[in-house]
Image (spheres, grey):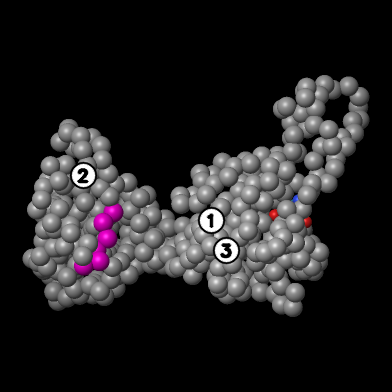
């Protein structure tokens, strides 16, 4: 996701049985690279121990008791430190206190003192959630720009069924990321290819490669978070399709080409797929039996999707990838010119820990007259950098209405 990398997030926990899910939330946010601090109400400490949250964040937890022995300015310090405060779970009582600007414990005071965006993830019995008092409090909170994450519907701790369950930590994480997502590509249409292609030899065999699709999927998320409408056309991978992205799974290069053509015109095209250059000339209907010691497999050239996109009119800002084992920059520049691209992202392959199937990558951005090395980082971080670089270069006015 990477939007949360280095973000300072205060997780406020109030007294609900859903507090056990706060530990998972804290863990997820930490895994996303956020710097997380926890503040707990006295009631929440009956549901989950502060030691658990201290261990997960690596920092002492702010509680009413911890504030007593200090200057009393803890709430001000945390309020200033936070990039965002999320109250998860937020009880009906806490929402009421928040709506009325109370400052009668550390967490409420923290919310009153901060200028950071506030997010609440309500958790309560469905009747309490539907009560007009709660509805009214939420109207007040929303009117002040406070964001509400959830709640979900389903079976509740009391055994009844209805709306009021705290939503899943992943959903809250996604909502928090949305706050930081910039809108630089708002209104732009971005088409991305990802993953390998499979070229059938017979019904059970195929030609393919080691591409995992991770880079293309990360680019799709980064472009989406930058406000673009994204079409992700992917060969077979084990990855879950990103939320809020148009996802077209394909198998062969011909299918990928057809799907890409169906998504044009676009403002930006990124060819991150490891497309098979060749395919078996005559895929067999029946499984091929073994006979001789040596066997010839005739191959024919596949269409070059990114090069064809670069020739279309209106032409999108066209970006390719080049995986090379040697002469990285010169090989990439040759492909940039041959395919008629605006930008090519060159990767050294065959280095352990980066490139194919790895979580990290390092790359050089190559243009006709200059190049820019990007040092080793996660594919999510690299995707965000690449989208930043594309945004600086691509025409800012969308050429296609979304
Ligand atoms: O020529 P090479 O395969 O190294 O070029 C890599 C770039 O070209 C990538 O952006 C890849 O997605 C794209 N490509 C393509 N269609 C092909 C071969 C490569 O779009 N048939």
Q: Which residue is mark 3?
A: 400
Q: Is residue 185 above or below residue 203?
A: below
Of the pair 98 and 57, the residue shown nearer to us: 98
Name the quadrant containing residue 13. Answer: bottom left
Q: Nearer the viewer, mark 3 or mark 1?
A: 3
Magenta highlight: main SS? loop
Q: Which residue is pictured at 78% across the width and 22% down the height?
A: 286
The dot on residue 164 is 2
The label shown at residue 230 is 1
Magenta residues, start to end: 144-149
Judge from the rendering whether residue 125 lies leftward or rightward of residue 332; answer left or right.
Answer: left
Which residue occupies 13% across, 58% down?
137
Say few, some or many: other residues with alpha carbon within 10 Å of mark 2 (under 14 / 14 to 19 / 20 or more): many
> Ligand 1 within 8 A of label 2's CB?
no
Q: Is mark 1 within 8 Å of ligand 1?
A: no
Residue contact between numbered discs 3 and 1, judged by CB atoms under 8 Å: no
Q: Is residue 168 left or right of residue 206?
A: left
**Residue depicted at 68% across the width and 42% down the height:** 255
3 or 1: tag closer to the N-terminus: 1
Mark 2 or 1: in front is 1
User: On screen, 319 above or below 130?
Assistant: below
Name which residue lies at 10% across and 65% down: 100
Tell me if I can see residue 264 in this picture: yes
- Residue 213 point in image, percent of width and height: 61, 49
Give the number of the mark in front: 3 or 2. 3
């Amino acid at each position: 996701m990477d939007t949360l990398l280095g973000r300072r997030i205060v997780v406020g926990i109030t007294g609900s049985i859903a507090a056990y899910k706060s530990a998972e939330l804290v863990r997820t946010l930490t895994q996303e690279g956020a710097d997380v601090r926890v503040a707990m109400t006295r009631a929440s400490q009956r549901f989950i121990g502060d030691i658990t949250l201290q261990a997960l964040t690596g920092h002492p937890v702010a509680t009413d008791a911890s504030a007593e022995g200090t200057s009393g300015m803890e709430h001000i310090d945390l309020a200033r430190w936070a990039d965002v405060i999320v109250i998860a779970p937020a009880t009906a009582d806490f929402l009421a206190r928040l709506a009325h600007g109370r400052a009668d414990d550390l967490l409420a005071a923290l919310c009153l003192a901060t200028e950071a965006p506030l997010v609440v993830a309500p958790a309560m019995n469905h009747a309490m959630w539907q009560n007009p008092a709660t509805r009214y409090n939420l109207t007040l909170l929303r009117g002040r720009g406070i964001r509400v994450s959830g709640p979900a519907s389903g079976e509740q701790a009391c055994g009844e069924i209805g709306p009021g369950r705290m939503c899943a930590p992943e959903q809250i994480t996604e909502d928090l990321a949305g706050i930081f997502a910039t809108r630089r590509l708002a209104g732009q249409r971005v088409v991305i290819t990802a993953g390998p292609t499979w070229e059938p030899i017979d019904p059970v065999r195929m030609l393919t490669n080691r591409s995992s699709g991770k880079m293309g999927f990360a680019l799709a998320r980064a472009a989406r978070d930058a406000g673009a409408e994204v079409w992700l056309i992917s060969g077979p991978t084990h990855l879950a399709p990103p939320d809020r992205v148009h996802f077209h799974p394909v198998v062969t290069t011909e299918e990928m080409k057809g799907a890409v053509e169906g998504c044009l015109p676009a403002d930006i095209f990124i060819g991150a797929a490891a497309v098979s250059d060749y395919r078996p000339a005559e895929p067999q209907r029946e499984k091929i039996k073994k006979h001789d010691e040596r066997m010839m497999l005739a191959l024919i050239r596949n269409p070059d999707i990114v090069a064809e996109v670069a020739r279309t009119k209106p032409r999108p800002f066209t970006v390719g990838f080049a995986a090379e084992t040697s002469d990285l920059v010169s090989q990439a520049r040759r492909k940039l010119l041959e395919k008629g691209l605006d930008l090519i992202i060159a990767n050294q392959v065959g280095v352990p820990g980066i490139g194919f199937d790895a979580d990290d990558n390092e790359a050089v951005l190559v243009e006709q007259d200059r190049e820019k090395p990007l040092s080793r980082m996660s594919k999510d971080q690299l995707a965000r950098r690449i989208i930043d670089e594309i945004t600086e270069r691509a025409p800012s006015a969308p050429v296609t209405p979304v």
